[in-house]
C-alpha cells in the first residue's frame, strides 16, 4: 500500500506498473483480517457495530489527508470501504428489525459507489465474513467469487499487475497459517499510520511543487 501510494502520488508511476500491482495486495489482506476478526466466536453483531463506528471515525479523520495527497476527493479512503463492509457484516449477524437492516443495505449500496474498490471491495469483506461465520461450501464459493471480482476490478486499471497483486493474497494467507508468530496487539497503529502517510505525501508534494 505504501509503495503504491508513494510511487504513484509522489513519483508519478502509472497504473500498469509493479508499484500498482504491489499495492493491490493490501486491500484483500485487510478485508481478510477484518472479516476473520469479526467472525470470531462471541457477539459478532456487537463487535461489527463497534468496529464500524471506529472505522467511520477513522475515515472522517483520514479524509483531509487523503484529499491533500491525491489532489481531489474522487473517492473516499479505504477506511470507508472497510467500514461499509463491516456494516454489511452487522446486517448478516444481527437479529435486529429486518426493515432497519434492509434500509442499511440500501444505504451501503449507494455509499459503496464512492469508496475505494467500490461495491466489489465492500462485498468482499461481507463475503469473507459469511464464509468464516458459516463455514459452508456455498459461503466459501461466494468469497472466492468476490475475490475474483476484485481481481477483475484491479485488472481493469492495472492489467496483469492488478491480477497478480490481488491474487498474491491467497498463497500469503495460506503460508501465514503455517507460521507460529506471536505479534503484539496494536489495534490503533493502522488507524494512525494510514492518515499520517497520506499527510506526508501531501506535504512532500506541496514542498516540491514548482
Image (tube, rainbow, N blue to C red):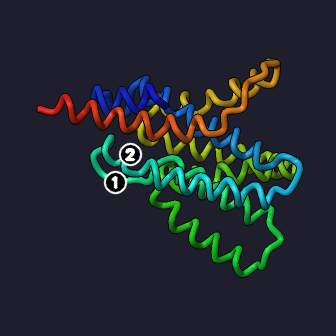
Of the numbered discs in the image, which one, if any, rests on residue 94? Answer: none
Above or below for 90 versus 36? below
In x, y percent, where is residue 85?
Answer: 63, 55
Q: In the visual, does 202 lie left or right of 61?
A: left
Q: In the visual, does 24 lie left or right of 103?
A: left
Tell me where residue 25 sits by quadrant: top right
Quarter containing the C terminus: top left
Q: Which residue is mark 2?
A: 66
In x, y percent, where is residue 82?
Answer: 59, 50
Helix, strand or loop for disc 1: loop
Which residue lies at the image location 85% right of the left edge and 57% below the top edge?
43
Helix, strand or loop for disc 2: helix
Of the numbered discs in the image, which one, if any, rests on residue 73? Answer: 1
Name which of mark 1 and mark 2 comes first in the sequence.
Answer: 2
Mark 1 and mark 2 in contact? Answer it, CB < 8 Å: yes
Q: Is residue 122 visible?
A: no
Label 1 and label 2: CA atoms lie apart by: 8 Å
Tell me where residue 8 sits by quadrant: top left
Above or below for 21 versus 88? above
Above or below for 146 versus 43? above
Amino acid at each position: 500500500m505504501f509503495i503504491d501510494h508513494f510511487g504513484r502520488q509522489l513519483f508519478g508511476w502509472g497504473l500498469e506498473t509493479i508499484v500498482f500491482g504491489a499495492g493491490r495486495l493490501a486491500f484483500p489482506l485487510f478485508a481478510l483480517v477484518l472479516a476473520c476478526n469479526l467472525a470470531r466466536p462471541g457477539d459478532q453483531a456487537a463487535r461489527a457495530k463497534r468496529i464500524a463506528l471506529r472505522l467511520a471515525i477513522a475515515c472522517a479523520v483520514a479524509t483531509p489527508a487523503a484529499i491533500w495527497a491525491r489532489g481531489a476527493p474522487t473517492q473516499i479512503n479505504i477506511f470507508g470501504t472497510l467500514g461499509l463492509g463491516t456494516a454489511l457484516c452487522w446486517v448478516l449477524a444481527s437479529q435486529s428489525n429486518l426493515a432497519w437492516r434492509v434500509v442499511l443495505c440500501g444505504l451501503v449500496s449507494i455509499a459503496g459507489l464512492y469508496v475505494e474498490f467500490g461495491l466489489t471491495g465492500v462485498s468482499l469483506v461481507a463475503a469473507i465474513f459469511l464464509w468464516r461465520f458459516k463455514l459452508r461450501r456455498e459461503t466459501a464459493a461466494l468469497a472466492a467469487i468476490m475475490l475474483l471480482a476484485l481481481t477483475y476490478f484491479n485488472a481493469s486499471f492495472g492489467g496483469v499487475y492488478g491480477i497478480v497483486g490481488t491474487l498474491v493474497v491467497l498463497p500469503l494467507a495460506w503460508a501465514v497459517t503455517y507460521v507460529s508468530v506471536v505479534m503484539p496487539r496494536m489495534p490503533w497503529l493502522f488507524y494512525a499510520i494510514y492518515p499520517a502517510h497520506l499527510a506526508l505525501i501531501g506535504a512532500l508534494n506541496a514542498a516540491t511543487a514548482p
